[in-house]
Image (cartoon, rainbow, N blue to C red):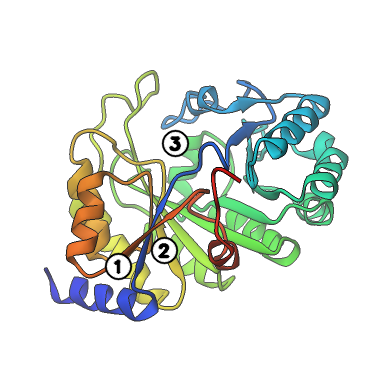
């Protein structure tokens, strides 16, 4: 282990000795409010990830599904969906419904937002959205060549600030290797994340996916992820850092998760059993969290119970 990795791990243990193994389903499912529709066809996604979400493309269907989920013990939902041409999930028709769901169920509501304008960030906060999951990109050429939209890093910076102003919790998500498997903009994204003083940071890793333009790529080298993870840990010594759901699951899975442990992450979504064994050997206290890896610390401490 390198000296920086040792330092990162030491910082993590000082921050908290626990490793949270996160299991979102069934207590914290993901819902697409656009069904399988998306105005973009990003090279790394190609609309494929929408197919794994619960489809609720109308306010009425969202309302009924959330009431049903709450009655069956769910404690929260992640509202997501396809982007419009401006690069954000079109929540406008769902605002009144989200407010009603929040009032009647008390579900903790996360939203995968995209580049929302300030007025929409404000309305989402007023409607009761508790947390915004925000994909943060730190390079203009990546935005143009991978997402295919005419936006800039400054647009991401602005939306991040709007969300932080109007929504209680904002969690930047940084995808390592998004630029065709290479590092480009990740460290700039970390700098932008630091501007809002986040309570938590999620690291993702490009996962070449069948049916997308990137399916023939290889994931970024594990050392590339390690550089970003260690930098993140040292930049943010007092917050949780998570390894999120988007990452390679087959080739090199254990190696990636083990490097994440060495680099000082506090949470891993859907970790392998070998990873949990390694964490225990490293002296970490493994705890299970039945929710998304981005939920706030106060929710972690309150405890999720999938049988609730």
- Circle 1 SS class: loop
Single out the residue that lies furthest toward the front.
Answer: 307
Where is residue 82 shown, x and y percent of the image? 62, 30
Q: Residue at x 28, y 36 (%)?
A: 249
As measured in the structure, the alpha-carbon distance from the residue carrying label 3 to the one carrying label 2 is: 25 Å
Q: Nearer the viewer, residue 132 or 187?
A: 132
Q: Earlier in the sequence, mark 3 or mark 1?
A: 3
As measured in the structure, the alpha-carbon distance from the residue carrying label 2 to the one carrying label 1 is: 8 Å
Q: Earlier in the sequence, mark 2 or mark 1?
A: 2
Label annotation for residue 146: 3
As measured in the structure, the alpha-carbon distance from the residue carrying label 3 to the one carrying label 1 is: 29 Å
Where is residue 222 shown, x and y percent of the image? 20, 50
Is residue 308 left or right of 68 when viewed as pictured? Answer: left
Where is residue 254 shown, x and y percent of the image? 20, 45
Q: Residue at x 69, y 59 (%)?
A: 163
- Circle 3 SS class: helix
Label annotation for residue 41: none
Check disc 2 and report the residue beneath it: 241
- Circle 2 SS class: strand
| Tag 2–tag 1 contact (CB < 8 Å) | yes
Q: Earlier in the sequence, mark 3 or mark 2?
A: 3
**Quadrant where the image shows the N terminus:** bottom left
**Which quarter of the figure has residue 73?**
top right
Label annotation for residue 264: 1
Q: Nearer the viewer, residue 296 or 83?
A: 296
**Which quarter of the figure has residue 114?**
top right
Q: Residue at x 27, y 58 (%)?
A: 260
């Amino acid at each position: 282990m390198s000296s920086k990795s040792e330092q990162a791990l030491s910082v993590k243990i000082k921050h908290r000795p626990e490793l949270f193994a996160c299991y979102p389903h069934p207590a914290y499912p993901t819902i697409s409010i656009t069904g399988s529709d998306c105005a973009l066809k990003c090279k790394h996604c190609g609309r494929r990830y929408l197919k794994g979400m619960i489809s609720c493309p109308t306010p009425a269907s969202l309302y009924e599904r959330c009431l049903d989920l709450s009655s069956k013990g769910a404690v929260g939902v992640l509202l997501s969906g396809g982007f419009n041409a401006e690069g954000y999930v079109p929540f406008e028709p769902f605002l009144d419904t989200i407010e009603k769901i929040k009032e009647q169920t008390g579900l903790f509501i996360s939203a995968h937002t995209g580049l929302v304008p300030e007025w929409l960030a404000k309305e989402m906060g007023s409607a009761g959205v508790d947390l915004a999951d925000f994909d943060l990109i730190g390079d203009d050429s990546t935005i143009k060549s991978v997402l295919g939209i005419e936006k800039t890093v400054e647009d991401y910076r602005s939306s991040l600030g709007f969300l932080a102003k109007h929504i209680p919790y904002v969690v930047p998500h940084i995808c390592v290797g998004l630029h065709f498997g290479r590092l480009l903009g990740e460290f700039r994204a970390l700098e932008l994340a630091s501007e809002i003083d986040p309570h938590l940071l999620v690291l993702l890793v490009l996962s070449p996916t069948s049916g997308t333009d990137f399916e023939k790529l290889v994931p970024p080298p594990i050392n590339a992820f390690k550089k970003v993870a260690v930098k993140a840990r040292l930049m943010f010594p007092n917050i949780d850092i998570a390894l999120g759901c988007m990452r390679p699951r087959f080739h090199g899975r254990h190696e990636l998760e083990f490097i994440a442990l060495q680099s000082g992450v506090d949470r891993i979504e859907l970790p392998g059993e070998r990873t949990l064994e390694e964490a225990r050997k490293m002296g970490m206290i493994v705890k299970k969290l039945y929710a998304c890896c981005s939920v706030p610390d106060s929710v972690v401490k309150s405890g999720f119970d999938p049988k609730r």
